[in-house]
Image (cartoon, rainbow, N blue to C red):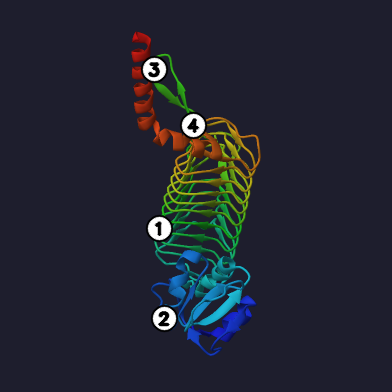
Amino acid sequence: MKITAAQLAHMLSGILEGDPNASVQRPARIEEAQEGDFAFLDNPRYESYAYTTNASVLLVAKTFQPVQPIAATLIKVDDVRSSLALLLQKFDPASQESATIVSEKASVHPAANLGIGTSIGAFAVIEEGAVIGQNCVIYPQVFIGRNVHIGDNCRIYPGVRIHYDCRIGNNCTIHANAVIGSDGFGFAPQEDKTWKKVPQVGNVVLENEVEVGANTCIDRASLGSTLIHSGAKIDNLVHIAHNVEIGANTVMAAQVGIAGSTKIGDYCLLGGQTGIAGHLVLADGTRTQAQSGIGSSVKEPGKALFGAPAFDYNDYVRAYVVFKQLPDLQKQVRALEKKLKELEGK
């Protein structure tokens, strides 16, 4: 795709400074960009690259005031990240793929229903009663179980498994090798110290605009639904157990683990490797730093937590400063004890 700076500025409702005919055909990082690339600057730490970059077009905030000459044509916008997201959609090769082909090597059950413009890749398996909406892309080696319903404009990457009766909304993306609807971890202890499997007969529901990362596993409910509300974004290698509920527009980084029947509120931000115990409730806007361990419910909206077990972020930071000083404090205490004994001896 080739486009001029003037066209980009019009598309983004931005202010153009420089050559309107400068053309670009690919995005690049500001420190690596070459002629014909467009780059962006949204972090002050990278400002020095703005004066040395070889990019033909540079996307910056309207508030940006250069302190040196810049060779690139500038496009100034209100929100650099949002504008970049729009541009990357235009340049995304996946979004330009044809969505009209069902591979001869795919196995599609006669009782499955495929929407107009949906493509099915080689060695994909679509079972009886599955319904897939319009303009979806089902990549090779995807398994879609019986009675699964998938909405419009979804993209299901290679190796994804979506088990029976699960529901996927519109505009969802599921990345490679994710598993939706595997059995929840349900076992009943027996008198002889063995474990009896409890059948997991519920399903998983992903509402609209949900994105699920590679190798993430979302377990089906024992009864009812494991529910991921609209706009949630889930990173790679996340585990969501049975009957968990994830609120709208909640975001979680890699290796988060959420135990069964916990309810996460809307607009929460969970740092990588956060672990959350079962049967808890996290209020809207809860934020956890990486590797935090949540062992009790969070009732106050907007709370920031850190540590394992996690507690108030600011308290944790203050406590950690003291923690790092413990060896010195220990020496001081021992020295004071020694002096005290000497005074007592006198």
How far is mark 4 from mark 2, CA to CA? 48 Å
Coordinates of residue 253 in the picture (x, y in percent): 48, 49
Q: Mark 4 highlights which residue?
A: 309
In the rendered structure, which amino acid carries the disc numbered 1? Gln
In the rendered structure, which amino acid carries the disc numbered 2? Asn
How far is mark 4 from mark 3, CA to CA? 30 Å
- Badge 3 or badge 1: first in the primary sequence: 1
Q: Which image quarter: residue 33?
A: bottom left
Point out which mark residue 193 bears: 3
Q: Nearer the viewer, residue 116 or 70?
A: 70
Q: Is 100 situated above or below 284?
A: below
Residue 286 seen from this side = yes
Point out which mark residue 54 bears: 2
Coordinates of residue 63 in the picture (x, y in percent): 61, 71
Q: Which one is closest to the eye, mark 3 or mark 1?
A: 3
How far is mark 3 from mark 1, CA to CA? 40 Å
Coordinates of residue 90 in the picture (x, y in percent): 53, 74
In the rendered structure, which amino acid carries the disc numbered 3? Lys
Q: Mark 1 highlights which residue?
A: 141
Residue 201 seen from this side = no
